[in-house]
Image (tube, rainbow, N blue to C red):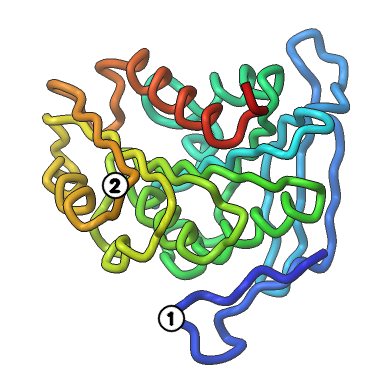
Amino acid sequence: MPEPPASPDAADDDFSLRITQVQARPRPVEEGEPDPMRLELRLGTTRGEISALLDVSEGQPGAVVFCSGAMGGAHEVIGPGGRVYERLAAELPSQGVSALRMHYRMAGEFEECVLDVLGACSFLSGVGAERVVLVGHSFGGAVVIKAGQIVPNVCGVASLSPQLFGTRQVEQLGKPLLLVHGTADAILHHAASEDIYARALEPKRMVLIPDGGHGLAEDPETVHRELSGFIRQLAGPPA
């Protein structure tokens, strides 16, 4: 398995992560029968175990990695905006895009979470993914911007209700960027997305959800539509 690159802020091996073991098992679907295209993953690494859910689009080179905010937990695989990660993971494989929903090893630790995303991208590259879109919410919105600067096969980044910390070098992203933020976000003001958007290079797009809160639950269909279109355009099979 290829080793993901180190964090750009790293000066030595203290900020590197290498995958040492991969375990995958089919997980049950609604009928209770295991589905070989829906997997539970455990990625053993030199910094601890990363767990994830992977919904496979067999034989297709496109993938998306979904990341949560700083609190971790169930939101890591459900997502904001009316459970948008869960919805897209069920839909995208039939549209030619595999979906990986990951649990952080150390939720809230910025550099460690960036390394987790690099590890997830390394795993996907090792199983044939050539185009990967990163999606993150809140704290994770900054994590995916940073990770997107580093990983060559990342072809786009979507940042939902992002924090500013960790986005200082967004102009180095060099890949399509989608920002989605609610205008009534009481946790991270939408000025954060406006600041990131102003510094990012084209191609970029910002969508403000009127009266939307931090979790973007007020308009889940817009969140779903924007993310689905962005992911399929960049990671899906050619039309």
Q: How far across and down, in percent of the image, does residue 192 sit?
A: 17, 49
CA–CA distance between discs 1 and 2?
Answer: 20 Å
Residue matched to label 2: 162
Q: Measuring 73% from the left and 71% from the top, which residue is drawn there?
A: 3
Which of 230/74 is in front? 230
Q: Measuring 33% from the left and 17% from the top, which residue is drawn there?
A: 222
Which numbered disc, 1 or 2, marks the residue that appears first in the sequence? 1
Q: Quadrant of the N terminus?
A: bottom right
Please report contact status of discs 1 and 2: CB closer than 8 Å, yes or no: no
Which of 99/111 is in front? 99
Query: Tag on residue 127?
Result: none
Which of 185/73 is in front? 185
Q: Measuring 28% from the left and 40% from the top, which residue is drawn there?
A: 161
Element carrying mark 1: loop
Q: How far across and down, in percent of the image, does residue 170 sit?
A: 32, 61
Q: Is the residue 83 above or below the residue 6 in the image?
A: above
Which quadrant of the structure image shows residue 205? top left
Element carrying mark 2: loop
| Left or right of residue 191: residue 219 | right
Q: Is the residue 123 above or below the residue 7 in the image?
A: above
Q: Is the residue 53 above or below the residue 145 in the image?
A: above
Which quadrant of the structure image shows residue 89? top right
Which quadrant of the structure image shows residue 212? top left
Q: How far across and down, in percent of the image, does residue 4 sit?
A: 66, 68
Q: Which amino acid type is shown beneath numbered disc 1?
A: Asp
Residue matched to label 1: 9
Q: Measuring 60% from the left and 45% from the top, which residue is drawn there?
A: 132
| Left or right of residue 126: residue 197 | left
- Circle count: 2
